[in-house]
Image (cartoon, rainbow, N blue to C red):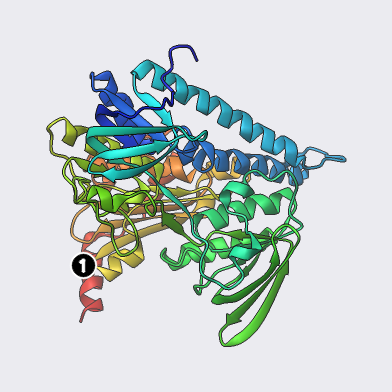
Amino acid sequence: MAGLKCVNTPTSQTEEHDLLVLGSGEAGKYIAWTLARKGMKTAVIERKYIGGSCPNIACLPSKNVIHSAKVASYFRRSEEFGITKDNWKIDMPAVRERKRKMVTGLVEMHLDLYKKSGAELVMGSGRFVGPKTIEVTSADGLIRLLHGKRVVINTGTRATIGPIPGLAEANPLTHIEALDLDRIPEHLLVLGGGYVGLELSQAMRRFGSRVTIIERNPRLVHREDQDISAALHELFKDEGIEVVTSARITRVEGKSGESVKLLANRNGSETVLEGTHLLAATGRTPNTDGIGLEQAGVETTDRGYVKVNERLETTAPDVWAVGDCAGSPHFTHISFDDFRIVRDNILGGHRVTTGRQVPFCMFTDPEFARIGLSEMEANERGIAYRLAKIPLVAVLRTRTLSETRGFMKALIEAKSDRILGFTVFGVEAGEVMASVQVAMIAGLPYTALRDAIFTHPTMLEGLIPLFTNVPPAAAAVANAQALHA
């Protein structure tokens, strides 16, 4: 660690900087590293997780644990692949250690990047005490006062613990604790059928837990198309995961880790659900309370997110907000784009969030990935489209892998060959989606993918039969006219 600036020294003087970053998440750390290399005196204030949540408690650790669960699923299916198994078991402490070892390596990588960039990492809790002025209190009580010509707020979000009677007192797991378990929950109750809830439900089921998902909406991932929800319901049913939809929890009793009981109202009837552990995965709350934003002249929305414009500027001059706390879509790759927007704007450019692509991938097994419009979104906006859809079993690579579950579909503009959206539920979905996204970025017509030569047998090869199935434009126009007649 020699030469690394990671210090806390008491001072009565205000320390001047060209740039202050509150929070070391994806956008904030890259802004600091980049501008420090350009000669700006830069400091990043971080309360706990060096590098932010992604490498410590979220994206990467969760995918690490999910992959361990995937390996466990292969063991259970071993006879299918001609392999006999005997006396195997899940060692959760070893699963946790693999994850922790990866996190340690990522933290060391981040510390090295701070050292090489020249940006200072200040460990402590920061709060605004005036315009562009942050007071930092270290764990041992030392206080520093920092002022920046420019300030970037990057404080992220945390798991929401809703106002359900008894929920907070039950001390439920969030994704942080769930990813650090050293024993398999006997029966895990999961509140929420979104990304976190679904990914961790499947992983814990594959480790050996009994799992029940409780979702307040009529279906899982209710903002997605019906066929995606149906496919996920079928997947979870096949894996032995119980899904309880249209359920509103009215009370929680007991303690997670011991015994917990959920009282719920489902379609007008009272339901009781009991388990040993409870995971709260019902959404995110911005980390904007208690950091003195009002002292800095920074306003928030009615949901608590920092109010920003399309340049990610806050209501205070020379103060930006990035990542989850700014209400950006809650993905690390979007936070990285926030970094590029603020970097360019600080350096005199003009870059905005308006109209940017928001790709995403849910890392269930198989994965669910989408770029552009879904059918639901297109219909809500009155956008006419042509639909092409094929089952994944039609992609021969899936047969070699024994991973034939799923489908892919594409929305093509009714009167042109422009790709409006692409969805895939299946093995390697995220990788396949990225190829279609590149075509969309380049403005290529769907015919470019239809007529491409892709290596056989690969997943990408499936784009050829998919786009071969696009209906003719004339038929789509006629259908759209009939629909609105």
Please, is residue 241 above or below residue 130 in the view? Answer: below
Q: Which residue is drawn at 58% across and 73% down?
A: 165
- Viewport quadrant of the C terminus: bottom left
Residue 427 in view in this figure: yes
Residue 420 lies, in percent from the top left, at 27, 54
Q: Residue at x 23, y 70 (%)?
A: 382
Residue 458 in view in this figure: no
Residue 294 lies, in percent from the top left, at 27, 53
Relative placement, left or right, of 97 versus 472 is: right
**Among all residues in the image, which is located at the extreme bottom?**
268
Residue 371 lies, in percent from the top left, at 35, 50
Relative placement, left or right, of 142 versus 35 is: right
**Count of marks overlaid on the render:** 1
Residue 186 lies, in percent from the top left, at 77, 57
Image-quadrant location for residue 402: top right
**Among all residues in the image, which is located at the extreme top?**
2
Circle 1 packing at 10 Å, graded few (<14), some (14-19), many (20+), is some
Q: Residue at x 69, y 73 (%)?
A: 273
Between 336 and 462, which is closer to the camera in this rendering?
A: 336
Image-quadrant location for residue 463: top left
Label 1 belongs to which residue?
Answer: 477
Q: Is mark 1 on a helix, strand or loop?
A: helix
Between 15 and 10, which is closer to the camera in this rendering?
A: 10
**Among all residues in the image, which is located at the extreme right?**
87
Image-quadrant location for residue 8: top left
**Amino acid beneath label 1:** Val
Between 112 and 436, which is closer to the camera in this rendering?
A: 112
Please, is residue 82 above or below residue 191 in the view? Answer: above
**Among all residues in the image, which is located at the extreme front?**
12
Between 412 and 197, which is closer to the camera in this rendering?
A: 197
